[in-house]
Amino acid sequence: MIRLLLTDLDGTITIDRGSYILDLNAIESLRRAEKSGIKVAIVSGNSYPVLRGLQNYLGFSGGIVAENGCLVFYQGVTIRTCEVVPRSLVSEFAKTFNLKESWQNEFRKSDFGYTPAIITDEMIEWANQRGLMISSSGYALHLSGKPGGKGVGVRKLLDIMNLNENQVAAVGDSKTDIDMFKYAAIKAAVSNADQDLIKSANVVLKLKSGNGITELVNMLLR
Ligand SMILES: O=C(O)COP(=O)(O)O
Ligand SMILES: [Mg+2]
């Protein structure tokens, strides 16, 4: 029986990919899931303050996984799962590749966001030489400390919630969500998701982004 729904934020509970506007029907559906006993956790590349605020005001009780898996919060416990990246490297990366830093970077320690969200071979090489990881959600390019990836945070969240993957559903829109699929029985992609995510999914939704969330919750509560 599904006890936890892991949902990505940008491109998944927003009205569309590329938008930051929350889909209010998706929020209402996630609240229905919470009322029926399925806890909802937001798993995102966004920073801890953003997700902590969203979780509080949206009324979700399943914890949060911020910084692309590098920071986990559940019932008052905060756990950092990745190496901290020195501020000097965060700035050097932006300068070297002429990138704009996310406004959220001042609130981050292990995973940092930049735009444009396009990864180049030179960036991968630069990161490898410094023992760092590179990923992109389509909204932002991410530089993070090892091990990095949403899966490491989800693994930790399931440990502290004492849940196994058969009790978990996950839904997302981009490549960075593939990593959390390892720890979910239901691996759902919204219809407008990256092809790589669709290939890794065992449920491909008919509807895009937030509408896909409503479709998935209706499926889970059937
Ligand atoms: O911060 C980003 O890159 C987008 O975040 P997401 O993981 O919620 O899609
Ligand atoms: Mg996303």
Image (cartoon, helix red, strand yellow):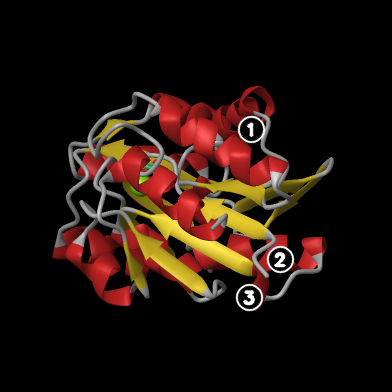
Q: Secondary structure at mark 2?
A: helix
Residue 150 at x, y = what percent? 50, 60
Residue 4 at x, y = what percent? 65, 58
Q: Mark 3 belongs to which amino acid?
A: Glu
Q: CA distance from mark 1 to mark 2?
A: 17 Å
Q: Which residue is mark 3?
A: 165
Q: Name the quadrant of the C terminus.
A: bottom right
Q: Nearer the viewer, residue 3 or 195?
A: 3
Residue sitting farthest toward the front: 222
The numbered mark at residue 134 is none
Picture residue at 57% right of the left edge, 73% below the top: 183
Q: Name the quadrant of the N terminus.
A: bottom right
Asked if residue 134 shows in the view, the reply is no
Q: Which residue is mark 1?
A: 55
Asked if disc 3 and disc 2 are in contact, CB closer than 8 Å, the reply is yes
Picture residue at 39% right of the left edge, 54% below the top: 172
